[in-house]
Every structure is written in structure tokens, then in C-alpha cells.
Image: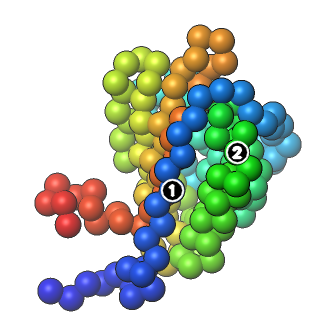
Amino acid sequence: MISLRPVLLSMISILIVFQAGSDGLEAQDKAAESPTPTYFIPENNIDAPLAELMRLFFRRLTQGQVDTAFQALLYKSKIADNQDLVEKLVNQAQRALEIYGAIDRVEPINTEAITPSYLRMRFLALHADFPMRWELTFYHSPGKGWIVTQVKLDDRVESMFSDGW
């Protein structure tokens, strides 16, 4: 069987996992006022603040604003307290943009809730040359709202099919 996946992609499997759970950086949304393309289709079963956080995050990524995208995503998260981890995450996302091209749009794959306060969301980022899988886990803190607790990014999109290839 011949793999259609470029050789470069098989050598660079990007997988980043960070765990978190507290306050971090504060971020402001100055880019939100500008008109945006249709690049993110929210799922109907997530609440408005979380859907808006995802729109903001992916809007900034599609605009190439990787640093500010992660500031917005991580501002309540314990992940933001570890600058080495944030730097690795930002660098990996920037590398994905360099390897696969700009993100044209992002499509939701699914949302899986363990409880109403803890859920995982999966997305497919459609880059110019190859799609990327994003997996984000969120906790709804009684005092802080939605906080990202885990971020994964990789190019192993074919493993999402039911046959597990």
C-alpha cells in the first residue's frame, strides 16, 4: 500500500500535551472587531463562551497570530505559568504553519463530555497542504469559567478513521 502522506510529514509528528489548572496570563481581544472569514463552524452542543474562545483562538491562528492565539486560549490556565511549555507549544504551531501552510478553516470533529464541567473538543485544521488534528480539554471552573487543561496537536489525522490506520 502506498502512503499519500508526504515523507516530511511522517518524520515530523507533532504531539504536544500540557496539563494545567489555575490562573495565568490575561489576554485582550483587539482582533475580534475586524471582519473574519468563515473558517470555524461551532458545534451546537457547546455553550457560547467556549464557542467564542474557540473562534478567537482559531481566528488568530488563521491570521498567523500564533502568540496571541495562545495567550487568549491559555490566559486562565496553569499552562500559561510555565513559559517553557508555552514557548514549545507556540513553536510547534508555528512549525505546523511553515510545513503545511496557512490554515484556511477549522472544522469541529466532535465534543466529548465526561460531565457538564469537563469536556474534550477535537478539530480538524485545514492547512494549504495537509490537515492537522487539534484536541483541547476544558474544565468549567465555578469561579473562572472555561479553562484549558490539555492541548494536543498532531498530523496523524488518518488515525481518526474507524479502522485506526
Residue at 65% across, 27% down? 22
Report the side of 14 relative to 114 (left or right).
right
Q: CB atoms at circles 2 and 1 under 8 Å apart?
A: no
Above or below — where is 64 with respect to 33? below
At label 2, which amino acid type do we have?
Asn
* Res. 102 in view: no
Measure the alpha-carbon separation of dots 2 and 1.
Answer: 14 Å
Where is residue 45 shown, x and y percent of the image? 42, 27
Q: Which residue is mark 1?
A: 16
Q: How many marks?
A: 2
* Residue found at the very far top of the displayed protein: 142
The one of 132 and 24 positioned closer to us in this rendering: 24
Residue at 42% across, 81% down? 11
- Quadrant of the rendering where the N terminus is positioned: bottom left
> Any mark on residue 82, and which?
2
Report the side of 31 relative to 4 (left or right).
right
At label 1, which amino acid type do we have?
Ile
Give the label, 2 or 1, closer to the camera: 2
